[in-house]
Amino acid sequence: MTQTPFETEIQEQDGVLISPFRRPIQMLAEQEYGGHLSIHDDDQAQALGFSGAPIEGPTHFSQFDPLLHQIWGDRWFESGCISSHFKNVVVEGEAVQAFVERPAGRANITKIWAVKKTGETVLEGTASLGPDHPETRLASLMAARETPENLVLLEHVKIGDQSSALDTVTMGYDQHLGDSYPFTLANKLETITEPCRWYFAEQAKTSPWGKAIIPTEMISPLVGHTPNGLPGPKGPSIGLFADLEIKMIKGPLFVGQEYQLEREVVGLGESARTESMWIKTVIKDPETGDVLATTLLNSATLKQSYAHYTEDAQRLGKVIGH
């Protein structure tokens, strides 16, 4: 049996690993970008038709780590990929349970999903093991969708746009991550749904790598807390994560270590309520240039949140609702 650094009690029924119900904590209530509050502020969220401020999507990834470590062992942190389509928001106080189907035979990909106690689906997707990953949930989702024309919020964004300069980032325990992520790694570890010995400085030497690793859910703040250098949606406007994939290639990533980021717009999308841009971030070792991990984020901006949407649509000859 795989020795686990987690204390999570895992159930298994009919080949499905099941986490306990957890109630994740909202940590982005004070988030600001573009000089205004975000979807994670209760008043802003309710004004846009949500019951309250959503828990940040990557938070739910922590509930999957113990399940996937049980299946793939330490390799999960070295070359695991979680690829998720978010279906319904979770408000602080709601309980969430995670599910992972055991891979068939020697397959290196499997289905994952999470639900609320009400039965409402929070997310669905795939988990896979690399370094040669099969087609993930988001890769298949992008391939199945046509690129929209005549976008309004994203009028000045195009596929292939790249960050203008290399960005170097680190994540220390007490490092404040700015207005986008108004908390520290230490703050997160006080409330993380699934503590792991290898996340903490005092137990770092017990990890297989002899160093403390960054939790899967915190890789999104690692790549997202600095300006991305890409053209973005018009504003003021409010967005949310519609899809997110975190893929390790030569992991894990370590606390306090320096990484280099390269970002590119790899897709554009539209729904009745949103326009979205798919941003791929490549995380590299700045000394060797090795690709260590990638993230793929579908950042969706709510049309309703942009005051000039209708007039800009008319200027562009766009029929509202299309």
Image: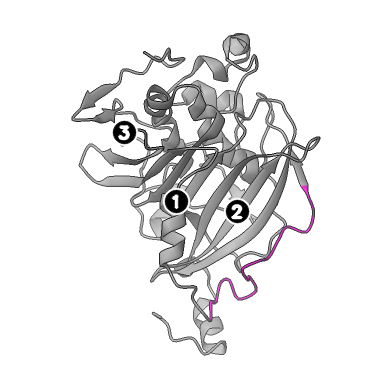
Residue 97 seen in the current view: no
Residue at position x 50%, y 46% in the image? 245
Give the residue type that dot 3 points to: Gly
SS assignment at label 2: strand
**What residue span does the magenta drawing correspond to?**
150-166
Image-based side of 259 in relation to 140, left or right: right
Q: Is residue 122 above or below residue 164?
A: above
Residue at position x 39%, y 44% in the image? 126
- Circle 1/circle 3 CB separation < 8 Å: no
Give the residue type that dot 2 points to: Lys
Percent from the top left, x then y, of residue 291?
68, 41
Percent from the top left, x then y, of residue 26?
45, 37
Q: CA distance from mark 1 to mark 3?
A: 18 Å
Q: Is residue 46 above or below residue 215?
A: below
Which secondary structure class fits the magenta region best? Answer: loop
Percent from the top left, x then y, of residue 12?
23, 24
Rendering quarter of residue 111 = top left
Residue nearest the viewer, comparing 231 with 16: 16
Indicate the quadrant containing the C terminus: top left, top right, bottom left or bottom right: bottom left
Percent from the top left, x then y, of residue 18?
28, 28
The residue beneath circle 1 is: 135
Residue 280 is tagged as 2
Residue at position x 55%, y 17% in the image? 198
Earlier residue among tags 1 and 3: 3
Q: CA distance from mark 2 to mark 1?
A: 16 Å
Q: CA distance from mark 2 to mark 3?
A: 31 Å
